[in-house]
């Protein structure tokens, strides 16, 4: 979700917004905000609750008033770190290298350069992050112009933090998801008589 500095808007809300065109831009990470626990809903699967974070990227592209665009990406915070399957961990590796394994503050990624692939969300019509990669040979990232505070999220991050659920609610959601998985799991096959591991042939 792309935003310009101004009153925070919930996802899909109004506001005075401009979006960068779909493309790949040199960028710099401008913020990484933990935003609490949220419920993931995927078609065909029981909802699950996970810790989330919002990463903001300042692009090397400006709006009609000369201000740099920012595009935000929400990601899950892995339960264990390092976690090679987690988008947030792999982003940290991209910008920090081996030091990513030992960071204790996601804000350590702020100011680090990379490229960001931007696309347009078909439903909202706004820009969103499709992917990221390292800078190419001879490329430079833009200077960090937009200064954010770790304790003062804006835009999507502010909205998500204000709408996070409690740990008790998360435990309830995940318990129901576990019951649903158990109810739909295929039963273990019963071995034919005489082939069970604890059978003793005579």
Image (cartoon, rainbow, N blue to C red):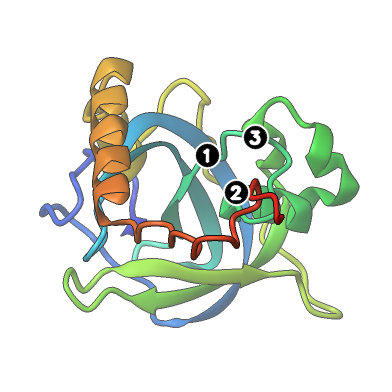
- Which residue is drawn at the image coordinates 39% and 31% (left, top)? 35
Q: Which mark is residue 77?
A: 1
- Structural distance between the alpha carbons of marks 1 and 3: 9 Å
Q: What element carries label 3?
A: loop
Can residue 156 be seen here? The reply is yes
- Give the answer, above or below, for where 150 lies relative to 156: above
- Give the answer, above or below, for where 118 lies relative to 104: below
Can residue 155 be seen here? The reply is no
Dot 1 surroundings within 10 Å: few (below 14), some, or many (20 or more)? Answer: many
Q: Residue 88 carries which label?
A: 2
- Which residue is drawn at the image coordinates 53% and 56% (left, top)? 58
Q: Where is residue 167 in the image (x, y as percent from the top left)?
A: 33, 18
- Which residue is drawn at the image coordinates 89% and 47% (left, top)? 98
- Which residue is drawn at the image coordinates 68% and 46% (left, top)? 83
Q: Position of residue 77 (x, y in %)?
A: 52, 39
- Structural distance between the alpha carbons of marks 3 and 2: 12 Å
Q: Where is residue 110 in the image (x, y as percent from the top left)?
A: 65, 41
Q: Is residue 10 left or right of residue 78?
A: left
For label 3, the residue is 80
Q: Give the number of marks.
A: 3
Quarter that holds the N terminus: bottom left
Circles 1 and 2: CB atoms closer than 8 Å: yes
Q: Is residue 193 left or right of residue 91?
A: left
Q: Which of marks 1 and 2 is nearer the N terminus?
A: 1
Circles 3 and 2: CB atoms closer than 8 Å: no
């Amino acid at each position: 979700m792309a935003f310009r500095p101004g009153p925070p808007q919930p996802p899909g809300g109004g506001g005075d917004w401009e979006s960068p065109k779909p493309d790949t831009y040199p960028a710099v990470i401008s913020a990484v905000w933990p935003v609490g626990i949220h419920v993931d809903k995927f078609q065909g699967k029981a909802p699950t609750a996970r810790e989330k974070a919002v990463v903001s990227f300042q692009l090397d592209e400006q709006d009609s008033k000369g201000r740099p665009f920012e595009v935000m990406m929400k990601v899950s915070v892995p339960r264990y770190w390092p976690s090679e399957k987690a988008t947030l961990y792999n982003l940290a590796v991209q910008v920090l290298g081996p030091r990513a394994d030992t960071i204790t503050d996601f804000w350590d990624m702020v100011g680090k350069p990379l490229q960001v692939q931007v696309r347009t969300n078909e439903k909202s019509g706004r820009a969103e992050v499709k992917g990221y990669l390292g800078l190419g040979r001879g490329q430079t990232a833009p200077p960090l112009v937009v200064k954010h505070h770790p304790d003062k999220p804006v835009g999507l991050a502010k909205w998500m933090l204000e709408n996070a659920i409690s740990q008790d609610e998360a435990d309830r959601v995940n318990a129901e998801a576990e019951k649903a998985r158990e109810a739909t799991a295929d039963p273990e096959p019963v071995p034919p008589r005489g082939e069970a591991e604890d059978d003793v042939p005579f």
